Image (cartoon, rainbow, N blue to C red):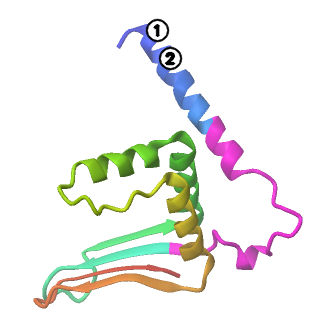
Amino acid sequence: MNRAGRVVAIAALAGIVLVAAIFCLRPARAGARPAGHSATGGTLRVRVWEPGGVTPTVSVNVPVVVVSAAIRLAAATGVLDRAMTSACDNLPDPSCPRLRGADIVAIWGQIASGRPVSMVDVDDGAGGRVEIKID
């Protein structure tokens, strides 16, 4: 990549960071809930156990605020819309739900705003397990 290409890439990255800051760091509404009850409090936890394992072999913790910001940014830039369209276009089943980025933002907002929830808990029957929850 030549110098001009690097300058354009850096400018694009700076623009993305600026847009993310505008969406994520805007002031709270006057009627907003206190910090302890915010829709973005908590942690998204992903755990994966191998068959016969006592402790998880994969353990990922992501603050819900980071997931929420990423989803809102992806929806605002149209990335979610394109991803959903592409995913449905690549499936042979015509009954694929046609969700928009705004729909996903609303669904995630409902999931993240509630009390702690176990979103996915899969046991393969052979001792392997996957757990995704919000604390």
Total labels: the figure holds: 2
Q: Residue at x 65, y 36 (%)?
A: 18
What's the magenta region? Answer: 18-43
Q: Residue at x 13, y 88 (%)?
A: 52
Give the CA distance from mark 2 to mark 1. Answer: 6 Å
Label 1, residues with CA under 10 Å away: few <14, some 14-19, many ≥20: few
| Front residue of 11 and 76 | 76
Horizontally, is 66 left or right of 32 in the view? left
Label 2, residues with CA under 10 Å away: few <14, some 14-19, many ≥20: few
- Find residue 4 and name its label: 1
Horizontally, is 25 left or right of 110 in the view? right
Question: Residue 2 placed where, x, y %?
Answer: 38, 9
Magenta residue check for 87: no
Residue 49 lies, with reference to residue 96, above or below; the image says below
SS under mark 2: helix
Q: Residue at x 86, y 70 (%)?
A: 31
Question: Residue 53 placed where, x, y %?
Answer: 18, 86
Horizontally, is 100 left or right of 24 in the view? left
Q: Quadrant of the N terminus?
A: top left
Residue matched to label 2: 8
Question: Residue 61 placed where, x, y %?
Answer: 45, 70
Residue 97 lies, with reference to residue 49, above or below; the image says above
SS under mark 1: helix
Residue 48 lies, with reference to residue 84, above or below; the image says below
The reply to whether dot 2 and dot 1 touch (C-beta < 8 Å) is yes
Amino acid carrying mark 2 in the image: Val
